[in-house]
Amino acid sequence: GARDMVDIGCGEGRFCRMARDAGLAPIGVDPTGALLEEARRRDPRGTYHKAMAEALPLADACVDLAVFYLTLIDIPDLSAAITEAVRVLRPGGRILIANLAGFITAARHDGFGRNADGTGTIHMRNYLDADAYRTHWRGIDIVNHHRPPAAYMRALLEAGLILTHYDEPPSTHPDPQIRARYNHVAYFIVMEWQKPA
């Protein structure tokens, strides 16, 4: 198993705290100062660096696990971020990715609606074309990037990684009505990739 990890785009450090509780030595990296301040407030013992995913301030081959949790959509240069994650992984190390499904990022926030009978609708925008758009999250201005799934797969395969797990997990929301609404389609994809030993 993994001994240490880097959470790339760690935000307020939730996964770093969870990793420490699971016995790993976590490192958090995020470009947003306000989120890192919150991470340090919640976890004064934590190791956090202000940096972009495309230029990690870490040594080569220094961690067993790299995590991208809902962050690849925020990163302008996908290939550079993947290359950096591979660089800091030890041989045999793994990258864990949880990302929004492509149709969610293609629809954006204003693409969701309702029919007269109350069923949900999704208006797609050029699903096969990569593009960027501004959004706001918790008071922070963010540029999100829609990319079709093939763009992610190409970048990961070109980096020499091996796909070891792929899933589109169902919702686990405790409210059955909300869970049923989210389970019409998968909102997230989860992938695990391995760096060759």
Image (cartoon, rainbow, N blue to C red):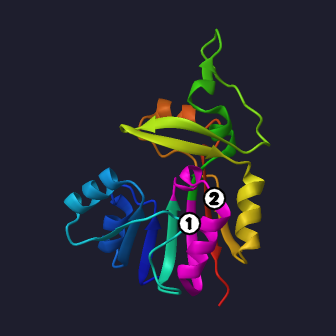
Question: Within 10 Å of the Cα at label 1, are there few (<14), some (14-19), or many (20+) other Cα atoms?
Answer: some
Q: Residue 47's x, y, as percent?
A: 30, 73
| Residue receiving disc 2 | 77
Secondary structure type for disc 2: loop
Tell whether label 1 touches label 2 (CB within 8 Å). yes
Q: Which of 166 and 6 is in front in this view?
A: 6
Q: Which stretch appears magenta?
A: 69-97
Q: Residue 127's x, y, as percent?
A: 76, 39
Report whether residue 192 is seen: no
Please give the name of the residue rendered at 58% of the width and 56% of the height, measured from the top-left corner.
72
Q: Nearer the viewer, residue 11 or 96?
A: 11
Report whether residue 33 is seen: yes
Q: Which of 50 and 137 is in front in this view?
A: 50
Q: In this view, does 188 lie to the left or right of 158?
A: left
Write down the quadrant of residue 134 in the picture.
top right
What's under tag 1, amino acid-wise?
Answer: Glu
| Residue receiving disc 1 | 54
